[in-house]
Amino acid sequence: MIPFERALEIVLNAAHRLDAERVSIHDALGRVLAEDVKSDMDMPRFDKSVMDGYACRRADLANELTVIEIIPAGVVPRREIGPNQCAKIMTGSMVPRGADCVVMVEFTDNPSENKIRFTGKETEDHICKQGEDVRRSDVVVRKGTRIEPQHIAVLASVGCVNPRVAIRPRVGVIATGDELVPPGQKPSLSQIRESNSCQLRAQISRIGAIGRNYPIAVDTDVGIHKILSEALAKNDVVVLSGGVSMGDYDLVPKIMKKNGIKVLFEKIAVKPGKPTVFGTHDKGACFGLPGNPVSAFVTCELLVKPFLYKMMGYKYRPRIVHVPLETTINRKDTRRQGWIPVTITDTGAAKAREYHGSAHIGALCGADGLVTVDIGVAEVRKGTTVRVRLI
């Protein structure tokens, strides 16, 4: 049994980078950039007014000014501003030559037609200079960035309509167990509906990978081998759930090895999730996750998620918040690092969910994150500041 930190290190060191492809900007959300994106022009391209007002010379602010032009957005000024002259200008419009400031409409009056007078005491320039935001050839979004809506706007502004992004990993998802029936089937007294493959595929899709579910594998060498070998041939990564513990029918580690997978670890010191298996082969990697749904969820979050992101060239950093604990957490088994589902309350505290163990998937519904409790710690008292890993 190895510490979680060591398991994560092994997993990340085994991740191989995928190739890249170009996609439409409209399909780029959530993808990972495979190259730096540079601006093809200065932004703004010209000295731009940031206010509705009058473009003029600061030296003339005490004088009556003649309005020589109206400049709407998108129109190039026709005239240069001379002494005691100004141009009415709209927000976003090009500032005419000769002007060095824009006075706001609110601080002017009109003593006569085509005349204005500045009524304020002083004014800022209210001009965004050419290239003030971005210079031509500046890197605006860096390689390895996971594209969010704000990045889409930047890509569009520099004309990058077909960004080069990492190919999405193909992930085969297999649930194992004689007791399992498909979700649409009503189970008999000794059976349960299979939920792990649905949950894991959803987690995988949320990461940005392409998940594919395979039929439930029965607990036999032949049954698991047949589906696993097919999945290994058609995917970059395979994620199994169940069949990894110490029972008579926990066959997954043996069959992984039979399929040419070099198993790098079989147990990690976390709760839930101890019987987690990971290995590699010449074409990819394979995870064997515990069959209980909370364990499967947590180990996917802790190990599969950062692995898939690294394959796409993204350095994943979990979102961590530090908040006080609303109620004391007690635990008997301190040999493993604990991961406890919690809700962030309206007061900004972490409240442990009602949690009956690794089969209690309902505990994750309504949970905002997981509190980690270190090995050897039996009690975390109310009011202690804890690290919550948001999920």
Image (tube, rainbow, N blue to C red):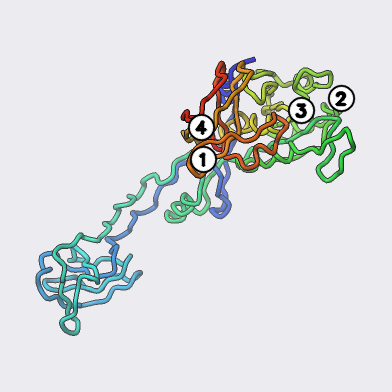
Residue type indicated by callout 4: Leu
Closer to the eye: label 4 or 2 = 4
Rendered-image quadrant of the C terminus: top right
Relative side of 247 to 293, left or right? right
Q: Indicate which disc, 1 or 4, sits on the residue closer to the N terminus.
A: 1
The local secondary structure at tag 4 comes to loop
Q: Residue lying at the far bottom in this picture: please name it.
A: 113
Closer to the eye: label 4 or 3 = 4
Residue wearing tag 2: 220
Q: Mark number for residue 325?
A: 4
- The reply to whether callout 4 and callout 2 are in contact (CB within 8 Å) is no
| Depth order, front residue of 219/135 | 219
Residue type indicated by callout 2: Thr
At horizontal 71% and vertical 34% (from top left) the residue drawn is 360
Identify the image quadrant of residue 115: bottom left
Identify the image quadrant of residue 390: top right
Q: Indicate which disc, 4 or 3, sits on the residue closer to the N terminus.
A: 3
Q: Position of residue 158 (x, y in %)?
A: 42, 54
Residue type indicated by callout 3: Gly
Residue type indicated by callout 1: Ala
Residue wearing tag 1: 34
- The reply to whether callout 3 and callout 2 are in contact (CB within 8 Å) is no
Spatial CA distance of label 4 from label 2 is 45 Å
Relative side of 38 to 371, left or right? left
Q: Indicate which disc, 1 or 3, sits on the residue closer to the N terminus.
A: 1
Residue wearing tag 3: 242
Spatial CA distance of label 1 from label 4 is 41 Å
